[in-house]
Amino acid sequence: MTIKLDNQGLRSIISEFDLLFIDIWGVIHNGINLYQDSIDVLDRLEKEKKRVCFINKRAKTKFYCNQIFEKNGSRKKKM
């Protein structure tokens, strides 16, 4: 399903979805550092009991991606 977001972004449609697919590279982090706005969104999704499936299109392992979360102080988000 394709939905054009308004200036409220994800907030305007989040109630309509139970599961979100979120790309890791360039959305959650740049390969080195996490994007704080993305972590804030993940925290909100967790509070709203939304399920998230991370998509990794790069040849990096789950272990490597988890290390980035941990290194950058995220609250132990795991893939």
Image (tube, rainbow, N blue to C red):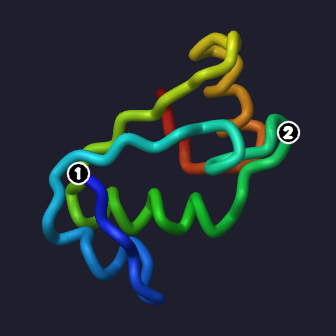
Cα distance, mark 2 to mark 1? 31 Å
Q: Position of residue 6 (x, y in %)?
A: 40, 84
Q: Position of residue 46 (x, y in %)?
A: 33, 57
Q: Is residue 30 left or right of residue 1?
A: right
Question: Which-is-in-front pick, marks 2 and 1?
Answer: 1
Q: Quadrant of residue 48?
A: bottom left
Q: Secondary structure at mark 1?
A: loop
Residue furthest to the bottom: 7
Q: Residues within 10 Å of mark 1 (few under 14, many from 20)?
A: few
Residue at (44, 62) in percent of width and height = 43
Q: Which residue is mark 2?
A: 32
Quick one: label 2 or label 1, which is nearer the N terminus? Answer: 1
Q: Position of residue 74 (x, y in %)?
A: 62, 49
Residue at (30, 81) in percent of width and height = 12
- Residue 1: give its label: 1
Choose between 20 and 68: the one closer to the eye: 20
